[in-house]
Image (cartoon, grey):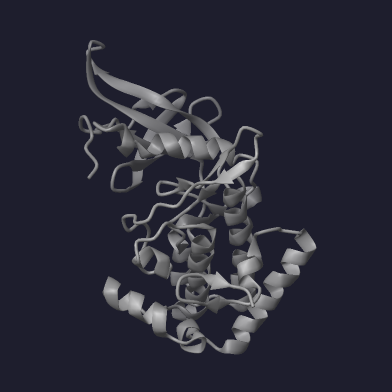
Amino acid sequence: MYSPLGPSKFSIGDKIKEFLVKKKIGDGSCDMVCLVLNIKDTKRAAMKLEPLMKSKDDEILKMEVYLFKKMQQSKHVCQLLAAGKTSFYKYKLYIIFSFFFLIMSLLGKESSDIRRRLHDRKMSIGSVLKIGIQSTTAIHDLHKVGFVHRDIKPSNFAMGRDEKANIVFMFDFGLARQIMFPDKDGKLKLREARKKVAFRGTMHYCSLNVHLCREQERHDDLWSMFCVLIQLLSSTLLWKGMARKDSAHVKQTASDRVLLAVNFSTILIINYELAIQKEKRNLQGCPDCLVDIKFNRNKISIS
């Protein structure tokens, strides 16, 4: 349970560095998102705010800033414009509240919003392929720096704006976990898995590993990504509306054809196209698990 040291109240017009708060555009369990305006060039951006927590283990935004910095080489991650810690004062004497902030480039519509606006709430095969290839590349970029996302879902992917309108961006790394650390020679070494962990992620898209409270690894992100692609293409998933326990049972026992809930030839097309893109781009370790997809009991495997 997150325990902030104090309330996170702010007003329209408050200034943080060279950014002016314009309005609130969203919030989460421990943070909020605001639209801000750069005073210097009048460009708009997005800012995440998180109050200081009583326990440092609850300070999610600090880790997210750290990950953002490591991911700046990826074209599928927002530009980090500013980050830090600041406080609001009363009469320039008394601190009202303190918080961490992260300011990043503004994105366009989320993939979930785009799908819901379409006829029958379905995307074409071509659109799903484009989103799938770019999203999987984004996941690959995350894995390369030693992290897993642990909450892959449509609302965590969005299109860019202006000249980057055709680029898919991945965001919200609040549940990400570092699974690889550099050894004494500088090579990344896999972190030892915990025997049992708490449920992390979104039930609709998570793998069976998550239901079983097992440590999430890279294939779990890809499992979730394929669920996302199926929903974009077919508008639904087989376990929609089910309780967590029933959802896990369906994921464990349903056949591939029933689980995918769409024409199987369509899935073969998606697999084939992703395999071609992997060969062209040499995306090592990226769409491997999407070349010949089999929903096994605890992971996606390649035959």
Of all residues shown, which one is farthest toward the right? 280
Q: Seen in the image, is 79 located left or right of residue 100? A: right
Q: Is residue 205 visible from the viewing direction of this image?
A: no
Q: Seen in the image, is 190 located left or right of residue 201? A: right
Quadrant containing the C terminus is bottom right
Q: Position of residue 66 (x, y in %)?
A: 50, 35
Q: Position of residue 268 (x, y in %)?
A: 64, 83
Q: Residue at x 61, y 77 (%)?
A: 125
Query: Is the residue 198 above or below the residue 78 in the image?
Result: below
Q: Position of residue 245 (x, y in %)?
A: 28, 74
Q: Seen in the image, is 132 located left or right of residue 158? A: right
Q: Is residue 47 visible from the viewing direction of this image?
A: yes
Quarter-of-image position of residue 243: bottom left
Q: Position of residue 184 (x, y in %)?
A: 62, 32
Q: Residue at x 56, y 78 (%)?
A: 294
Q: Seen in the image, is 95 located left or right of residue 44? A: left
Quarter-of-image position of residue 254: bottom left
Number of numbered callouts drawn = 0
Quadrant containing the N terminus is top left
Residue 301 vs residue 36, the one in the foreground: 301
Query: Is the residue 235 above or below the residue 153 in the image?
Result: below
Q: Residue at x 54, y 71 (%)?
A: 300
